[in-house]
Image (cartoon, rainbow, N blue to C red):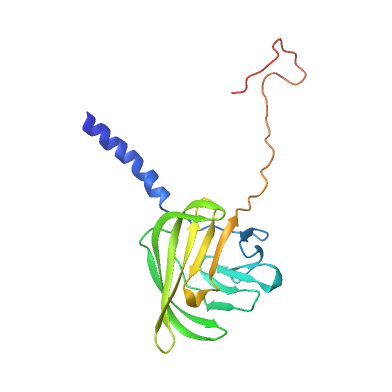
């Protein structure tokens, strides 16, 4: 009996575990805001399946609908762009990977590259906004005459439906930011509809317990 009970518990817990390590692709609407340590970025438009987030001073971050980076531009003019952005397949699951050909460009140069992405882990990531369970997706390729290895990582937190951290190597400082707070839309006020007592009815008790 204990053996079958154990199997039953294991079977019932497996879907929950699997579900916690699988993330469906989110969607965003104009006006959504990501608050980073450098500035607050608002989604100002969606163009050719690209989410365009902008802040003051000309700073912009572009993501594809797959949440792969298309472009990052800082106020100081530092820019990195991928055209087209790497294609990431959803839902995210640890171990999932793929390869895309794209054109990579920076103010110092660029060229055609073969980018490999991989969901490396589902882990805790701590940023100024808090600690979240997130999928770490790494992107890597080689570039330059010496075939230098280049790469960066993003952390997508399903709980808040956004990338909470991006981190590149020394050669990719333009790709480095963290979320400092989560912009949560105001919740609608709570509304109650009572069946009993009827409107204008009189009751003998001073308090009514709602179930």
Residue closer to the observer: 113 or 146 = 146
User: In the rendered view, does 43 fall on the left or right side of 131?
Assistant: right
Which residue appears at 57% of the width and 59% of the height?
A: 179
For the N terminus, which image quadrant?
A: top left
Q: Position of residue 111 (x, y in %)?
A: 48, 86
Please tell me whether residue 123 is drawn above or below residue 147 in the rendered image: above
Q: Position of residue 119 (x, y in %)?
A: 40, 63
Residue 127 showing in the rendered view: yes
Q: Position of residue 195 (x, y in %)?
A: 66, 23
Residue 115 showing in the rendered view: no
Which residue appears at 69% of the width and 38% of the height?
A: 189
Q: Quadrant of residue 93?
A: bottom left
Q: Residue furthest right?
A: 200
For the C terminus, which image quadrant?
A: top right
Q: Position of residue 192 (x, y in %)?
A: 67, 30
User: In the rendered view, does 169 fall on the left or right side of 58?
Assistant: left
Which residue appears at 62% of the width and 74% of the height?
A: 74
Which residue appears at 67% of the width and 20% of the height?
A: 196
């Amino acid at each position: 009996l204990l053996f079958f009970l154990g199997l039953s518990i294991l079977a019932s817990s497996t879907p929950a575990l699997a579900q916690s390590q699988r993330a469906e692709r989110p969607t965003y609407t104009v006006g959504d805001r990501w608050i980073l340590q450098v500035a607050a970025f608002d989604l100002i438009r969606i163009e050719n399946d690209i989410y365009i987030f902008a802040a003051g001073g000309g700073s912009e971050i572009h993501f594809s609908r797959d949440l792969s980076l298309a472009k990052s531009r800082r106020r100081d003019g530092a820019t990195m762009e991928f055209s087209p952005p790497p294609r990431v397949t959803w839902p995210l699951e640890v171990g999932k990977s793929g390869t895309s050909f794209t054109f990579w460009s920076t103010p110092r140069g660029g060229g055609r590259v073969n980018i490999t992405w991989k969901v490396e882990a589902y882990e805790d990531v701590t940023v100024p906004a808090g600690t979240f369970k997130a999928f770490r997706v790494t992107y890597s390729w080689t570039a330059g005459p010496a075939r230098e290895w280049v790469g960066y990582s993003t952390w997508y937190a399903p709980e808040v439906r956004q990338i909470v951290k991006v981190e590149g190597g020394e050669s990719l400082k333009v790709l480095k930011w963290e979320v400092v707070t989560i912009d949560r839309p105001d919740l609608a006020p709570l509304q109650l509809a009572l069946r009993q007592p009827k409107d204008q009815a009189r009751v003998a008790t001073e308090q009514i317990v709602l179930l």
